[in-house]
């Protein structure tokens, strides 16, 4: 039986255990993460937390709707057992009708091809081989960037403070702009789980010129928010940070999750590390009854 539970009714230990042991586990689905990124969230639970489906939601003009919060690429149904299409249909049918609009980015382990969905593309890299073997899959541009950075003796600083990162990020010219609520969420993430949220960076003359927020759970290293100066990009420093992360977690059960992208230039950058395409689906539905 699938039950709808409000946030305060959730058994956090059982819920988090389900996410941790899930074949398709994602860091975005843990209680602590959703508490930060979602305005509100409830959950659908199969029996005694055999499978769960978190439902982040908002209310506007007294109309409640389910939405994908910033910094959560993939949610959907999670289970330590294989998830059939019939079970997915049962979960979707169990979404309360009080939500007049439903937008869910199902994780790549949810085969929702039976729905009217839009395909999304992510890129992932298995870290089960040693670094030298993974490095062979880098293209010539990545190898050249790494050699350039090494020759100039750039070093990774693994102790960047949240305040220094945010100051650098907010003041560095970019070809995009985060909304204020997205910035607030990042600030809250950086205040919290220090065993899951990390900041690495590279300095020149003590000044931060490239940095990255990345996430770690039991299965994935997630490339969350990079920023680099033009000088850093010219010297291949974003490549160096990714390469060092890959080296650090090589010969492990981890997957490096690049978190996208549908943008061709970014996709090509991720592919240049040997990353493989992973498809997930965005579902949108309206209900006015």
Image (cartoon, helix red, strand yellow):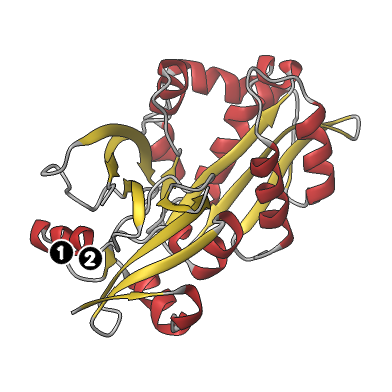
- Residue 107 pos. (x, y %): 31, 50
Tell me which corner region of the image, top left, top right, bottom left or bottom right, holds residue 200: top right
Residue 209 in view here = no
Badge 2: residue crowd in 10 Å (few <14, some 14–19, many ≥20): some
Mark 1 vs mark 2: in front: 2
- Residue 41 pos. (x, y %): 47, 63
Number of marks present in the image shown: 2
Is 268 situated above or below 199? above
Is 205 situated above or below 20? above
- Residue 233 pos. (x, y %): 66, 19
Secondary structure beneath label 2:
loop
Would you say 122 lies left or right of 131 here? left
| Residue 94's disc number | 2
- Residue 186 pos. (x, y %): 67, 48
Front in this rendered view, residue 91 or 102? 102
Residue 231 in view here = yes
Is 5 situated above or below 173? below
Residue displayed at 63% across by 56% down? 197
Residue displayed at 47% across by 48% down? 72
Tell me which corner region of the image, top left, top right, bottom left or bottom right, holds residue 47: bottom left
Residue displayed at 15% across by 43% down? 115
Secondary structure beneath label 1:
helix
Q: Residue furthest right?
A: 205
Would you say 94 lies left or right of 222 here? left
Q: Are marks 1 and 2 in contact (CB under 8 Å)?
A: yes
Q: Return the residue at label 1.
A: 90
Front in this rendered view, residue 137 or 93? 93
Question: What's the distance in space between the residues labelled 1 and 2, CA to CA?
Answer: 6 Å
């Amino acid at each position: 039986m699938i039950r709808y539970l409000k946030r305060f009714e959730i058994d956090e230990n059982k819920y988090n255990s389900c996410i941790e042991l899930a074949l398709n586990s994602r860091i975005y689905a843990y209680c602590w993460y959703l508490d930060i990124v979602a305005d509100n969230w409830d959950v659908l639970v199969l029996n005694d937390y055999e499978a769960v489906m978190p439902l982040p939601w908002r209310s506007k003009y007294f109309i409640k709707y389910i939405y994908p919060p910033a910094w959560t690429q993939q949610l959907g149904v999670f289970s330590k057992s294989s998830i059939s299409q019939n079970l997915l249909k049962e979960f979707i049918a169990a979404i309360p009708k009080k939500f007049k609009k439903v937008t869910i980015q199902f994780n790549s382990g949810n085969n929702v091809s039976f729905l009217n969905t839009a395909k999304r593309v992510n890129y992932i890299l298995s870290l089960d081989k040693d670094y030298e073997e993974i490095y062979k899959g880098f293209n010539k541009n990545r190898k050249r960037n790494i050699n350039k950075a090494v020759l100039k003796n750039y070093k990774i600083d693994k102790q960047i403070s949240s305040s220094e990162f945010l100051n650098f990020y907010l003041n560095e010219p970019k070809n995009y702009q985060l909304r204020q609520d997205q910035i607030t969420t990042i600030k809250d993430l950086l205040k919290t789980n220090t065993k899951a949220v990390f900041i690495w960076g590279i300095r020149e003359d003590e000044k931060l010129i490239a940095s990255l927020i990345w996430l770690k759970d039991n299965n994935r290293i997630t490339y969350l928010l990079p920023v680099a100066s033009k000088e850093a990009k010219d010297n291949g420093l974003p490549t160096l940070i990714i390469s060092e992360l890959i080296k650090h977690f090589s010969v492990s059960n981890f997957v490096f999750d690049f978190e996208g992208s549908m943008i061709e230039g970014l996709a090509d950058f991720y592919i240049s590390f040997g990353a493989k395409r992973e498809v997930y689906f965005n579902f949108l539905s309206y209900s006015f009854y």
